[in-house]
Image: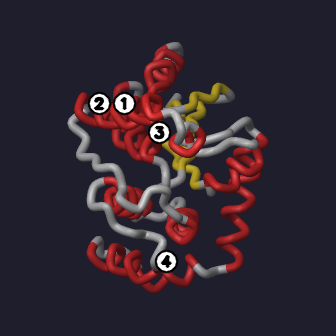
Amino acid sequence: MTQRIEFVYDFCSPNAFLAYKALPALANKHRAKVDHVPVLLATVFKATNNQNPFQAFSENRKKTAYLTHDLHRFARARAISFHMSPHFPVNTKFAMRGAVFAMGKPWEAKYIDAIFDAIWVHGQKVDEIGVLTEILQENELPVRKIREAMTSVEVKQQLKEQTKAAVKRGVFGVPSLFAGTEMFFGKNSLGNLELELSKNS
């Protein structure tokens, strides 16, 4: 039976970007299917009294320096192209609505790749609809439909509901990954996720 991994993410997180890039190799190794679950991290933080670690530890220079070093070290070890966004923290509400609309569609992976790379490889400012439109065009995605979804009341509500459901399951940040009922938080928990998958491989 094919195992499933639920990947709960928001494009605004560099850790989610790195986990997203590293996850396919792990999933393929264990013949697992990855389901991508978009949420709005700002809402998760508000609901769980949490915050971005770079903001939480902004006065601790050694801690924030380590967090940055850890991101680049993780990327180098896996040959992932990565640059810290010059626009961090990134507002991704429109991009995440697009991600909700993309769920289950043949071009979902292409959309996720395009937005993640725009932020964490190319340093683009995705909080602007005009920039998002250019990204969609460059990647030959259905521009008109996705742009409509980004301002759709229904899609906005679906993102809210998915975020609320994730919090109810125990999500307090991203990336959060689920294998069955077990939750694994952060890119550095991929090793423990693999141990869990190994039980049924």
Residue at 29 percent across and 30 percent down: it is 73
In contact (CB < 8 Å): disc 4 and disc 3 = no
- Categorize mark 1 by other alpha carbons within 10 Å: few (<14), some (14-19), many (20+): some
Position of residue 130 measured from the top left corner of the image (x, y, whole percent): 41, 83
**Residue under circle 4?**
146
Question: Between tags 4 and 3, which lies in front?
Answer: 4
* Residue 175 seen by the camera: no
* Residue 158 seen by the camera: yes
**Residue under circle 1?**
70
**Residue under circle 2?**
73
- In primary-sequence order, the first of circles 3 and 2 is 3
- In primary-sequence order, the first of circles 4 and 3 is 3
Report the amino acid beneath label 2.
Arg
Report the Cα–Cα distance between label 4 and label 3. 25 Å
- Categorize mark 3 by other alpha carbons within 10 Å: few (<14), some (14-19), many (20+): some
Position of residue 127 measured from the top left corner of the image (x, y, whole percent): 48, 71
Q: Which mark is residue 33?
A: 3
Q: In the rendered image of this protein, does residue 7 appear above or below residue 98? A: above
Report the amino acid beneath label 3.
Lys
Report the amino acid beneath label 1.
Asp
Position of residue 175 measured from the top left corner of the image (x, y, whole percent): 53, 40
Question: Between tags 3 and 1, which lies in front?
Answer: 1
